[in-house]
Amino acid sequence: MRTIQKLFLSTALAGSALVLVGCQTAEPYVSYPYEVTAQNARILKRLDVKDIAVDQVRVVKAMDLECAGSIIPIPGQEEFKTLNGAFSNYWRNALMADLNQAGILNQKNPKVKIYNLIDSVKIQAEPTFLAWRINMELFSSNGHSMKLDVVYNAPTDGLKNMQDGCRRVASTLNKAVKWSVLKAISDPRFEALVQPGLDFTPSMKAQSFQSLFLGEDEDDRWVDKAPKKPEN
């Protein structure tokens, strides 16, 4: 245990992630696409609802996923200007995939729309603790909302060094998002969110205290979209 503790050093980065530092040789990490599960589909089917759409998903705070000298990637991030946009898209597609698996997704003609304003996404890596933490608030077009603070713990058995811990954090991105979706849809409050209603549109322009100091342009601050392809 003493050897592992010497190899690990945890530090907080400007209101963002807790990361591992002190690594001499950085190496790339691997994260994986989202995969639907029968468990999530069963929970959604029990709600006895249909025609749900997933509208906007937005990460409010600037994300810093550096871990021991390398950045934890988000699958598909090359299509987006920021990690915020990539993670927002990843989470949105995850919920859509689970809704589709349950046979209740309807993006074209929904009876209700779900929004997610994710306040922060953080990683934590320590000698005996590896985790993702996702703080978010879901809104419904029927006027209901719910806040969640979700923590997913990655396994720590047999950790070898700092980079091994970071690799584990990166490889569990899909599991952390799956866990956050599971926590949302299994929460008793979620049933109220998916009842029919299209009269409410939440503001997705909320900003964190940190974002006041980022010096972003107004358009860049609120919009995280893939860059447009040049016209032929």
Image (spheres, rainbow, N blue to C red):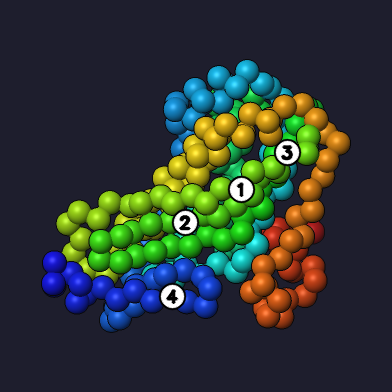
- The residue shown at (68%, 30%) is 192
Pointer 4 or 3: first along the chain: 4
C-alpha distance separating marks 2 and 3: 23 Å
Q: Amino acid at mark 4?
A: Ala
C-alpha distance separating marks 2 and 4: 14 Å
C-alpha distance separating marks 1 and 2: 13 Å
| Residue placed under numbered mark 1 in the picture | 147
- The residue shown at (74%, 69%) is 220
C-alpha distance separating marks 1 and 4: 24 Å
Pointer 2 or 3: first along the chain: 2
* Label at residue 133: 2
The image shows residue 160 at horizontal and vertical percentages of 18, 64
Mark 3 lies on a secondary structure that is: loop
Left or right: residue 172 versus residue 143 is left
Q: Are marks 1 and 2 in contact (CB under 8 Å)?
A: no
Mark 2 lies on a secondary structure that is: strand
Q: Are marks 2 and 3 in contact (CB under 8 Å)?
A: no
Pointer 1 or 2: first along the chain: 2
